[in-house]
Amino acid sequence: MSLQKEPTFTPAPSGIRLALSLAVLVLLGLNLRPLLTSIGPLTGELRDITGLSFSEVSLLTTIPILMIGAMALFAGRVTTALGYRHGIGLGLLILTAGLIARLFEPTSTSMMTSAIVGGVGISLLHIVIPELTKQQYLKRLGLVTGLWSAALMGGAALGAVATPWAAGLLPERYQAMGSWSLLAALVFIIWYLPINRTPVASIPPRHLLLRAYKAPRAWVLGAYFALVNAGYAGFIAWIAPFYAEFGWSAQASGNLLALFSLVQVIGALILPALSRSHDRRPWLALAVLTQMVGFIGLSWFPNVSPWLWSALCGFGLGGAFPLCIVMALDHIDNPVQAGRLVSFMQGIGFMFASLMPLVTGWFRDFSGNYTFGWQLHILVGVIILAMTWQFNPKGYKGLFNSQE
């Protein structure tokens, strides 16, 4: 069986319909990270209310990322059963429910439950959007994937900077974490407006779908994606509490996380757009080296220029994420099969990356500081660089032609 034959593409929208389609894609991306980044600025207050330890608080970041990974492994069944339109609609609905749970006084149980429910919602969006993007925007794949990734990171910035601001306006400060349910509910309504047209997923019979777990390259991509996203997971979980220990306020540390996320947007837009050939390796190497410099600064010179260190981490991690997705999509022409590969890669990748906040939280509990955690990210960067050079597009042909 050849997975490269008869790729099915939907003609890309144009004019006003293109602008609307991209605007909706941006709105979807904005919803994918406030569940995670709204925790950091209020970590101290949340621990006071719930009695959670640092490593237990890290689970509020670990669990959603773990859910993204676990659900991605069932991508084939999800899109076959739901299609693009209802897959995204259901994801938004479940995410809204998870966020609404945070409007009530937090307990350890309620926070963990909201992390699981919200993580399921986010995971459905992560499954469907890359496949939908390749089917609609094949000739603009790098640019559109970068735009969606930039929106995702912009949502992370909003979650970090607006949550402490909203906390000062609401009757109870913890309600700021649940206020993001309003954005998810709004986008759910917009998604089902008649003017928003979504192509029907052209899914081959199940026995013809890619079985990524049988391909060694799929596992390599999963490991690579895990390492790329480990830095992001560790950073968003602990950068705000890290600088809170230097006396920074919740708003100031949240602003630092917001800067990281905003610079991620720049990296996500610039690096994929510059990688016009299928050889993404030079740009991936640049992204990894940039974030390594940022982690070096956090490890040994945290007070010298925290804004610079955060910006460098943001640019590198922001550029690496969409480049990694586009690189995986480059392996297979058929958008459905390419979507299966990306889902498998994200499944393996997010499941292992989700452990990084827990590991660094454990380091904080037992060593009393975050230094070892930041230094671990430097080591991970070295491993990523060593792996990057094997992704030569000249060797992609035939890697997935006989997965039975």
Image (cartoon, rainbow, N blue to C red):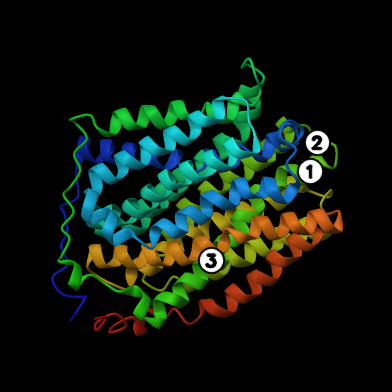
Residue 243 is marked as 1
Residue 346, position as x, y percentages in the image: 44, 62
Question: What quarter of the picture does the C terminus occupy?
Answer: bottom left
In the picture, measured across the screen, residue 340 lies left or right of residue 266, that is left
Q: Quadrant of residue 313?
A: bottom right
- What's the CA distance linking mark 1 and mark 3? 26 Å
Determine the residue positioned at 85% across, 37% down. Answer: 247
Q: Quadrant of residue 402?
A: bottom left
Image label count: 3
Determine the residue positioned at 54% across, 43% down. Answer: 115
Type of amino acid under label 2 = Trp
Neighbour class for label 1 at 10 Å: few (<14), some, many (≥20)? some
Residue under numbered circle 3: 226
- Disc 2 is placed on an element classified as loop
Q: Earlier in the sequence, mark 2 or mark 3?
A: 3
Residue 248 is marked as 2
Query: Marks 1 and 2: in contact by CB < 8 Å?
Result: yes
Do we see residue 147 in this rendering?
Answer: no
- Disc 1 is placed on an element classified as helix
Compare residues 351 and 220 and report the one nearer the observer. Answer: 351
Compare residues 90 and 141 and report the one nearer the observer. Answer: 90
Do we see residue 202 in this rendering?
Answer: yes
- What's the CA distance linking mark 2 and mark 3? 31 Å
Determine the residue positioned at 45% across, 38% down. Answer: 31
Can you say whether 377 is above or below 265 in the image? Answer: below
Type of amino acid under label 1 = Tyr
Query: Marks 3 and 1: in contact by CB < 8 Å?
Result: no
